[in-house]
């Protein structure tokens, strides 16, 4: 078995179940430090009796509405150091936070939170900053070809094949 993060072969086929950012993954001992090790969950108890509502629903064969799945993923993404770019360009143009906020029809506190990195602007707000400051904050992301980035040809892709881990 392979680690779901780095792809390293796990010895003794005993992966460590680790919760990392809300997802439980089977990882090696090196990658287990990135999350919280999970205990094996207890087996759920079975309920012998069914409620009247459950049996009535099965008799009617009522179909539940299916939520539509979005076909396309977003193609715009905010650059990583957006806050530094905005602050440096604002200062280069000699604008105060209040002046910039007035030009983009936002509060000065919004500009301050974006510049400090405490707030991530949505695409609409980022486009306002781009227009006034004449900078590029939104980059187009194209289709990602996973086959080009695989470390091992004979195995399934792992999370480590797709992302970069910051240390």
Image (cartoon, rainbow, N blue to C red):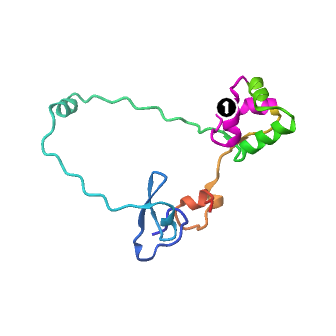
Q: Where does the image place residue 39, in percent across and percent down from the top left?
A: 34, 62
Which stretch did the figure color magenta?
105-132
In the rendered image, the quadrant that contains the N terminus is bottom left
Q: Which residue does the image show at 76% across and 28% down from the upper left?
A: 98
Residue visible at 54% across and 67% down in the picture? 7
- Please, is residue 25 above or below residue 142 in the view? below
**Residue in front for this viewpoint, 124 or 61:** 124
Residue, disc 1: 110
- Residue 60 % position (x, y): 22, 27
Number of numbered labels in the structure image: 1
Taking depth in this image into account, of 81 and 45 the one nearest to the observer is 81
Dot 1 surroundings within 10 Å: few (below 14), some, or many (20 or more)?
Answer: some
User: Is 69 in the magenta?
Assistant: no
Residue 91 is left or right of residue 8, and the answer is right
Assess whether residue 121 is covered by the magenta stretch. Answer: yes
Secondary element type, mark 1: helix
Side of 52 relative to 20 (left or right):
left
Q: Position of residue 134 (x, y in %)?
A: 83, 34
Q: Quadrant of residue 58?
A: top left
Residue 97 location (% of width, % of height): 76, 32
Q: Nearer the viewer, residue 76 or 37?
A: 37
């Amino acid at each position: 078995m392979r680690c779901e993060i780095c792809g390293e072969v796990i010895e003794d086929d005993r992966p460590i179940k680790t919760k990392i950012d809300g997802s439980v993954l089977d990882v090696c001992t090196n990658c287990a430090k990135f999350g919280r090790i999970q205990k094996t969950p207890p087996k759920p108890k079975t309920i012998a009796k069914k409620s009247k509502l459950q049996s009535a629903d099965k008799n009617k064969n009522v179909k539940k509405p299916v939520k539509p799945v979005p076909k396309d993923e977003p193609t715009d993404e905010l650059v990583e150091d957006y806050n530094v770019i905005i602050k440096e360009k604002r200062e280069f143009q000699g604008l105060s936070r209040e002046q910039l906020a007035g030009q983009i029809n936002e509060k000065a506190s919004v500009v301050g939170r974006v510049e400090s990195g405490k707030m991530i602007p949505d695409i609409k707000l980022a486009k306002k900053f781009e227009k006034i400051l004449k900078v590029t904050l939104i980059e187009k992301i194209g289709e990602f070809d996973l086959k080009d980035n695989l470390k091992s040809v004979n195995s399934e892709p792992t999370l480590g094949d797709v992302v970069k881990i910051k240390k």
